[in-house]
Structures are given as structure tokens and as C-alpha cells.
Image (spheres, helix red, strand yellow):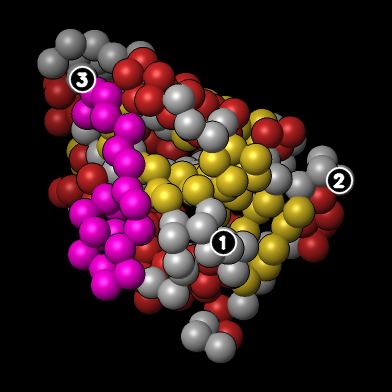
Amino acid sequence: MQKRNTQQRRRAIIERLNMHREVMVDELAQLFSTSEVTIRKDLTELENNGLLLRKFGGAVPLPQDASELSSEKLSARKIAIAEAAQKLIKDHNRIIIDSGSTTAALIPLLKSKLGLVVMTNSLHVANTLLEGENEPKVIMTGGTWDPQSHAFQGKMAEQVLRAYNFDQAFIGAAGLDLNKGTTTFNELTQLTQVMAEVSSEVVVMAESEKLQRKIPNVELPWQAISILVTDEFIAPSDRQHIEQQGVKVICAQTNQIGA
């Protein structure tokens, strides 16, 4: 495998860890054609950012009892965030739904909305929307398939987006930086930026624990974001800091799902 830059390599390590549930230093060094010292630095940095747990000779995913975010609780947060976000959508709105598990949680909640026009770069989002009874008008961005984000990216997708204007864009985030905005391991951030540019309102949907992830690539600065929909576990000081940057913060209550 050809050498990758540091952030690409670290992103690939996380993906491999998610797939195999364990990674070893010697195997990673061979896989990425780099030294074991470099891989140890990568694992240390990823652990510091709350993305894995170091073990002798390698790393494993964070155990559920070491984090508040068991899959069950995480699912509840995503659903609560999606329910809060869908209340922002009016009948006949023209919206963008970005790829991602949190934004995809919106889809089952759109069946009560009339006359929607939905643009997406996600095959999963498009297919699921078209399976619903109250089928909206769906537009795909097209473009180049990116296996890292499981979505279409690239100049063609950007050109298609710029041919339209939208009421709202619903965008996820791998990380949140209190001072900078949304962050991502994916270096292909241009399409998300175009989504924001062509939308009157930009709604970011992200769990509060994303504030603990130090991820290098800034995707959207707070100045480009209208609303952050997160969960009730966000620290009051963090919420205040974000609101001071002109962003409305909506805190979804996981104990009120379906209410």
C-alpha cells in the first residue's frame, strides 16, 4: 500500500479498527509502509481524542462501560436529535440531507411532510426516501463515489448543487470544535461547504460527545451554521460558547422520544 499522509492514515486505522475490532502495531506498520514508532504515535493521538483504547501491542475500540455511548444510548440520541430536527422542516421545503447515520435518522420522520424536494449525495438516503409512502421529489448530486464517506463527492456534485437553492441543509459532523465549527477526518470537505452556500439555513445534527473529538479538518465554521441540534448532555458552558458565535442550539431530550 502506498504511503498516506498522517490524517489519511489515522482515518484508515479507525476504519480498520471498526471492521476488525482490534489492530496491532506491527501489522499497521507493514500495511501503511511506515515505522512502528509512527504507528504508536498515531494510536496515542487517536486515544487522546477519545477514538480508541490502547492495549499492549495495539489498540481496541472503547469498551461500552468506559463510555456513556453504548450503541443503545447512541441510537437514542440520534433518534432524539432527528425528531428535534424534523420539527424545523415545513411542508414543501426544499432541503438537502447529507450522508451520515444521524442525518439518515431524519428519513422515517419525513413521511408526514408534504411536497418536499430532497437533494442528497447518499444512495442510502435516496433509496430509503423512495421506499416511503409519502414519496418526496428526490434529486441526487451525482459525482465521484467516495468509499470513505460512502457518498458522492467531487466537482460534478458541486456543480449540480450550485444549480439549485434550498431552504435548509441537514448536515452531520464527525467532530465539533468549540472555536472552529464542525470537523472531519475526510479531507473532501468542499461538497459540504457548497451545501451550506446554497441553503438559506444550515442545520448541523451531532451528539454532544462529538465535542470531545479533536479532529483536524474543519468542515464548516460556526459562521456558516444556523442551528446545532444536539442532545441534552452538552455542557452549559459549551452551549453558551457556541451560541455566542451566532448559532442557535437546540438540545433534544432523549427521554422524550416520540412525545
Q: Is residue 205 left or right of residue 102?
A: right
The reply to whether discs 3 and 1 touch (Cβ–Cβ < 8 Å) is: no
Name the one closer to the observer, 175 or 202: 202
Q: Amino acid at mark 1?
A: Ile
Name the one closer to the observer, 48 or 178: 178
Task: Tell me the quarter of the picture where residue 256 sits.
Answer: bottom right
Q: Going 27% across and 24% down the picture, which residue do you hit?
A: 143
Q: Secondary structure at mark 1?
A: loop
Residue 244 shows which numbered tag? 2
User: Can residue 34 be seen by looking at this rendering?
Assistant: yes
Q: Is residue 253 left or right of residue 38?
A: right
Mark sitting earlier along the chain (2/1): 1
Residue 89 shows which numbered tag? 1
Task: Tell me the quarter of the picture where residue 87 sits.
Answer: bottom right
Circle 2 crowding by C-alpha within 10 Å: few under 14, some 14–19, many from 20 = few
Q: Going 25% across and 39% down the picture, which residue do you hit?
A: 150
Nearer the camera: disc 3 or disc 1: 1
Magenta region, residue range? 125-145
Note whether 201 is above or below 253 in the view shown.
above
Note whether 65 is above or below 176 in the view shown.
below
Q: Going 56% across and 61% down the picture, which residue do you hit?
A: 89
Q: Which residue is mark 3?
A: 32
